[in-house]
Amino acid sequence: MMKPNDSDLANQQAVGGDQHQVERLRTVLNICRRMSAMTDLASLQNLITQEAKELLQADRVSIFLFDRDNCELWSAISQEGQTMRFDARLGIAGAVAMSGQAINVADTYEHPLFYKEVDLATGYRTQNLLAVPLHSLDGAIIGVGEATNKRGGVFTDDDAEILGTLAARVADIIETSQITAQLNAQNLERAASYPATQIISGFSTKNIVGMGHRIRSIIRLIDQIRSSSVDVLIQGESGTGKELIAKALHFNSPRARHPFVAINCAALPENLLETELFGIEKGVATGVDKRIGKFESAHGGTLFLDEIGDLSLTAQAKILRVLQERSVDRIGARAPVPVDVRVIAATNRNLEACMREKNFREDLYYRLSVVHIQTAPLREAPEDILVLANHFLQKHCAAMSMEPKQFTQAAVERLQRYSWPGNARQLENEVKRLLASVRGKMITGEHVAIPSEPAPEPTKAENKEENKAEPVKSLFTAVEALERRMIADALKETGGNKQRAAQNLGLSRQGLLKKLKRLALPSS
């Protein structure tokens, strides 16, 4: 008998590989056809969690839906038997929801975006992971398909293509069939049965509204230091959410069960500062009763010192001593009182400039800024204006027991053209004014009472291009321009470090490189 040579073996293997691919394709088409005929959630769940996982040789396959209003992902189809919800700006699935790009990770615990809290909450150990976006018929991202723990290896490009095909079919079904109503009912029912429903996200990260890369970076930082109690300095303009970030830091830390005490340093008269911060003993003066200060009130928890840049140098020195000694001296006391307090300070001032001008102590600055967070003004995050406006609209309609209102396209354009010098606080006040003054359901451009701002003078090059262009930018062009700016900002912030820039943008490094190539941006 003749033995097959190497060429024969290679041909046989190729034929075998082709046959395997054909069989997989047939299985995918069969699953898609059966999905199209489904009208009940239980059948769809069984198909996804059983047959799709066998096709992919995965331990689990799940579908997460994107709750854009609350910026959360929730597990609509999974094997856990309970609904999990978590902040969509965290984790690999969240990065897929934010970017619309598939992510394939061979070792999850080595990946900087992996969100370990889901594993901790469920007791499951994720080793490798493949996640793809679910797109609606109009192209919006409505969820994420996820496969975990490939049996006998890691997920391949073929697996990604198969999961993407199945995810596209699931998205069509969710949007166009009665399964949508069943999913919504399931979500409401399980949300009402808390704590049976597993809420993974922290207490107040969802109160920090926004989906831009800077907000996502802050949310990820809060998650990264959640087990720590280090002091934090938050700098940024008024109205950029500094206190919301401070609360999220506190309520996601080991100190969450203890007090969160906030004080506005700018409102503290110099003669009352020591009493307010450190306390006073009874009898120091006629009619004076014992009173503990803010440091003692926050014992075991967090003290939020807002607008710390407004304190005098004398007051700064006294706070520095407390941070160094971790004890306070009440006025009139014979001995210091130990305090266990995490300090989060915030300011709208440029403290680096204040130090150069000798108006802020360097030793206090470095003591406070163990972790430093810089918030962005709204004019630098225009992608978040509409997100915030809709959030405030829903929030205050509910608070005022009003019928929900909507912005017309003209109102949206008016809101997005304005620079909002007062940031989110000014935007919220405008929304409240609109709710109080607009009688109908629709808020139009004429209702929005903000000054029109002249557009910046175009350069000669821009004028030349404008003459060639159509009068109105296409959505594609606008999105591409936004992508260019966000990528350029991320690279500038990270000093050109593509790995960190990709993380801030919610992309893989390879995904960022592909975007740089597609947009003809310099890659070195």
Image (spheres, rainbow, N blue to C red):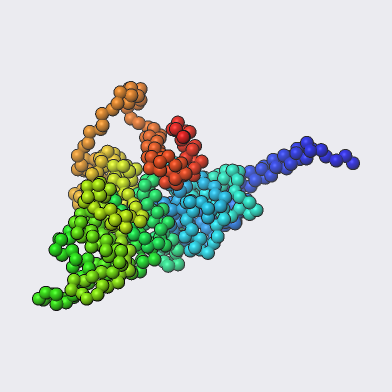
In this rendered view, identify the residue nearer to me: 6 or 341: 341
Horizontally, residue 108 falls left or right of residue 344, namely: right
Q: 379 above or below 362?
A: above
Q: Find residue 447 and report its image quarter.
A: top left
The residue depicted at 15 percent of the width and 61 percent of the height is 270
Would you say 53 lies left or right of 287 here? right
User: Residue 183, percent across and down?
Assistant: 46, 56
The residue lying at 45 percent from left, 67 percent from top is 196
Task: Residue lying at the far left in this picture: please name it.
Answer: 286
For the N terminus, the quadrant is top right
Residue at the image position 57 percent from the left and 45 percent from the top: 160
The location of residue 225, given as percent across then percent down, is 41, 58
Does the rendering let one see residue 39?
A: no
The answer to whether 191 is drawn above or below residue 55 in the figure is below
Q: Position of residue 497 (x, y in %)?
A: 44, 42
Coordinates of residue 387 in the picture (x, y in percent): 33, 47
**Residue at 47% of width from left, 51% of height from top?**
113
Q: Which of 238 and 37 is in front in this view?
A: 238
